[in-house]
Amino acid sequence: MDLDVVELSRLQFAMTAMYHFLFVPLTLGLSVIVAIMETVYVMTSRPIWRQMTKFWGTLFGINFVLGVATGITMEFQFGMNWSYYSHYVGDIFGAPLAIEGLMAFFLEATFVGLFFFGWDKLSKVGHLGVTWLVAIGSNLSALWILIANGWMQNPVGAEFNPMTMRMEMTSFFDVVFNEVAQAKFVHTVSAGYVTAAVFVLGVSAWYLLKNRHTELARRSIAIASSFGLASALSVVILGDESGYSATHSQQMKLAAIEAMWETEEAPAHFTAFGFPDQEARETHYAVHIPWAMGLIGTRSLDTEIPGINELEARAEDRIRSGIIAWDALQTIRTDREATDPAVTATFEEHSADLGFAFLLLRYLDDPREATDAQITMAAEDTIPTVWPLFWAFRVMVALGFSFIGMMAYFFYRASFRNMSFPRWALWGAVAVVPTPWLAAEMGWFVAEFGRQPWTVDGVLPTAMSVSHLGATELLITIAGFMLFYSVLFVVEMGLMLKYIRKGPFMDVEDTADWMARHEHRLRTHDGNIPGAPANTPVEPRTAGATPAE
């Protein structure tokens, strides 16, 4: 396969996936925050909470629609750009992907419609149930996508069938409860909660700075800071769980993130800072935290974490084992009925390493003819580019801890300082609104780039997974996606900013509450509202509107 086609296919999928994930975390988090706000409304019957639910629900709806539109594009790419991948592992990958489609397009979308159009048709409790089902559906949709992705990181519950030349599922239970998938789900969902909390906090801070919708803003900050603090703490804890699972499922990725070239004595140190040099196989100006990586990666003081050089040597051994599996496979394919049982036994013994033999197809057509130099080059290919992984991980971690500090500060001011916030803190909350998205994108970069050169770790190399397309075709589609997504981005930002500037509107129930609180200010000496027939209520334009407005 032409490497230009492989790289262009990777670029297109990376671009569409990272763009799609701009919408996913906010959808996950806002759905839960909106459900919490409506729960308070049902419990208290205070119209301000209904108003908050509708306002933040509107922003959720805009984001949800764009997320669905961009997600459809991603799924079509599996058939268009990654057809051999779809053929080879479709039996396993297709099942959770299909369930995710049912969750997103049937369950979630149905209840989103009821959320927006059911306010006057459902009871309070009934509508609250719908809102929580929207939140649950959003999170279940993410669960099945992450089960599919987790299987690509740790392909359990499946085996290669030499008769069909495909991977086939052996245990749906193992696929669903894959430890990598479960760790990724809780970590990703918690990151989405933090993203939404920072978003709500930033928009509310802007309202306070402009002295607009202050009642809504203060209550929103109280919800966002408490919800965000719990979520930010869980992100760190659950991220640690992801690191622990990588210790025995993706050791090369973990070593590359740490720029750990040599295997160290247990417990390994954590490199807080440094400049990885892949050519020299060392990290310059490294600053280490003793024992930290050993504790994170192994939960012990006496278990080693293998370094890149040792893992490369192991990969070379697995390539040689994979060549034996390849040779046995060719014999089986030549005459399936008359195959010697000893050949079948040989294949089964080495079949787990067949994917490593596929790495040689980059250099020659038949892995059995590989030279020692080609085997060495293929083993070196198992090392991802280290420096981007090293720095992306540290940016993500630094932002994660900063969210804990920010949420703790606003939670303290909201809970113990009568919701009084200094202007510098409010401006800071507005300024950091984009940073959770940066942290989320860095996390996905680490997860996906760190898996290279594999599409399915240890099973199917990326270079084998692509469709037989031309570079020109890919360049045209990439240009088309860039144009289309740029338009969608302008639409998304325009709609979000429009409704944020406009702010929440009062509905009939809100107006009645407003009138009750301001009646003594509105009425003249004869008991009527100025400029209106006797006993006619006014309908203020926006929340916080004055009689003059």
Image (spheres, helix red, strand yellow):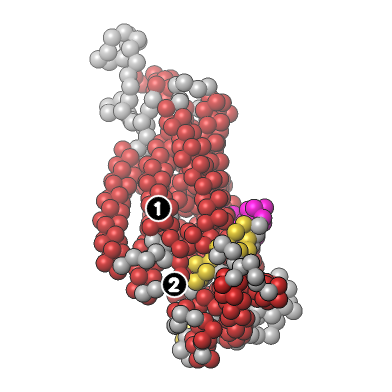
Q: Find disc 2 in the rendering and name its residue.
A: 463
Vertical position of residue 114 compared to residue 197: above or below = above
Q: Residue at x 43, y 37 (%)?
A: 57
**Where residue 511 sits: x, y (%)?**
39, 23
Q: Marks 1 and 2, how far apart in space?
A: 19 Å
Label 1: how many Cα within 10 Å (few below 14, some 14–19, many 20+): few
Residue 318 as seen in the image, left or right of residue 400: right
**Where residue 88 sits: x, y (%)?**
51, 62
Q: Find disc 1 in the rendering and name its residue.
A: 76
Q: Residue at x 55, y 26 (%)?
A: 126
Indicate the secondary structure of the residue bearing disc 1.
helix
The quadrant where residue 503 appears: top left
Residue 395 as seen in the image, left or right of residue 210: right
Vertical position of residue 20 compared to residue 539: above or below = below
Q: Residue at x 28, y 9 (%)?
A: 533
Q: Is residue 145 a member of the stretch shown in magenta?
A: no
**Residue kind at label 1, given as amino acid type:** Phe
Magenta segment, which residues?
A: 171-186
Nearer the N terminus, badge 1 or badge 2? 1
Q: Residue at x 61, y 68 (%)?
A: 336
